[in-house]
Image (cartoon, rainbow, N blue to C red):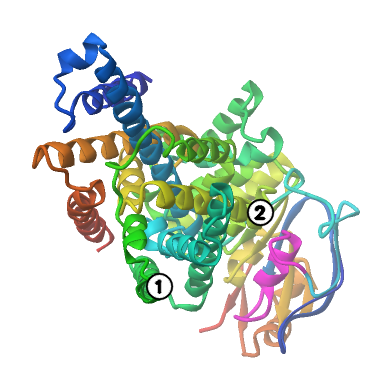
Amino acid sequence: MRLLPISALFVLALAATSLLIGAGGLSPAELLAGGDEGRLLLLASRLPRTFALILTGASMAVAGMIMQLIARNRFAEPSTAGTVESAGLGMLTVTLLAPGAPVLLRMLVASAFALAGTCLFLALLRRVPLRSPLVVPLVGLILGGVISAISSFIAYRYDLLQSLGAWTTGDFSAVLRGRYEMLWLALALTGLACVAANRFTAAGMGRDFATNLGIDYRRVVAFGLSIVAMVTALVVATIGMIPFLGLIVPNIVSLIMGDNMRRSVPYVALFGAAFVLACDILGRVLRYPFEIPVGTVMGVLGSGIFLFLLLRRGARAG
Amino acid sequence: MIEISGVSKRYDETVVVDDVSITLPRAGITAVVGPNGAGKSTLLTMIGRLVSASAGRIAVDGLDVATTPGARRLSILRQDNHIVSRLTVRDLVAFGRYPSSKGRLTRDDAAHIERALAYLGLEALAERFLDELSGGQRQRAHVATVLCQDTDYVLLDEPLNNLDMKHARDMMRLVRRMADELGKTIVIVLHDINVAATYADRIVAMRDGRIVRSGPPEAIMTSQALAAIYDMEIEVARIGDRMLAIPY
């Protein structure tokens, strides 16, 4: 397959662009000349930001893919399943109850909340009559709305709205060396998920299909949800929510090459990274030297593409 | 040999399968028939370990299905094959090798996949996505997956659903070939008693969760037996050497 190296090169080109632009006031030539100031800017800000973009894009896109296989629905992803909002509520809870808690503990609490929220979502799905595949994201969005209302209420009472805002709006402008490294863990978890790629694909064909092949369906689902919850919590805590990413990327890859996760997961990861890089670059240059948060750019672009996918699927189903 | 002894399935207060005991011999086709809600599919899914029994024991070749992993001995195809995943036919069929290869396909596995595709005449469709196929083609792809699993026992749950007359006949001929040429033991849930009588070696008839009759087609294809199974008058006509039930 020659497509893979081409995709990887494309991501590298975007990453290079991301390294070279910004409000820092250094021309690419000055940056590359390697003066002290240039090196500091590059190592402390530009490089971490670019890494963060790639890590977030790749791991959230794969998380979205896993969610879609587990929920057996095209429109399921962490931000349409209550996962993101639950992770935010978890962060809020741990900030309130244990303000001095170490980062790892905060992540674990947020992951536990995210997992609980996603399980609640799946439990709701089992009770709601599913007349149309669109009911699934609707249930998730409503659940997410309820959870984020609870978060807003608590945050309002304890003067934490600003922190909550940081978790719910994806923004890479605050990424500096020493403040994004948790995202490597997200990538590691994503890599771990790929080990079970075949099992996720089988689970996507349904419980009976997987069970017939001797696969422990419940264990695969539990494993997948845990990975998704932890990745989401890590991203929400370091960058904030990036809407639609986990939805659009796997869907477009699926249109082109199908849902065999083992084959498509590298493309999902690369395309996810490319999409976030592109949106962030766009946000940085549109109102230069000011920035538009990536979450906002993605929200606008993403909802457009989402609408396109919806109408396209609808046309085919009809 | 499939030994079913004292098997029941209850959902809360409802008894779906009620203390069923029967032994299905090795080889040949056993058709399970009966009216809606008789418990046919539930019994089949219990043998296929998709659902656990509330009581009783099911053993395949002497091994309890509840405690022994059996994906290499027995495969089951459910009637609900509502799919959202976009897999190619070849990828789907390749999953049949999962129990033995765990995802690392050997040359031997590749040969199995090609054979299964060829057996169902799917070579030309191998690279097509499942959601681009007709219902009959998709059903064949699922049967190919089960065939590719290469188990001695194959359970099929109403595989003729949604198939037109020609495809239904082709499917049954194929099932017959699988039994005769490949020596598979096939248990198949069927709706149409005439299809069962035409293609099966044995018929097991269920009603209200119990087995009411079982035996070769000749024993089931009598007005008296059919009345006991379906609770309606059914005339049986003999045309040449074939028996036809005429319910209408």
Residue A257 shows in the view: no
Q: Which residues are magenta?
A: B33-52
Left or right position of A52 against A301: right
Q: Position of residue B236 (x, y in %)?
A: 63, 79
Residue that badge 1 annotates: A158
- At mark 1, the secondary structure is loop
Q: Residue furthest top?
A: A33
| Label 1 environment density (alpha carbons within 10 Å; few <14, some 14–19, many ≥20) | few
Disc 1: host chain: A
Identify the residue at image location x=38%, y=77%.
A157
Query: Closer to the camera, A138 or A283?
Result: A283
Q: Position of residue B122 (x, y in %)?
A: 46, 38
Residue that badge 2 annotates: A219
As for residue A47 lying within the magenta part, the answer is no
Query: Closer to the camera, B59 or A250?
Result: A250
Amino acid bearing label 1 = Tyr
Identify the residue at image location x=56%, y=43%.
B144
Residue B117 shows in the view: yes
Count of marks placed on residues: 2
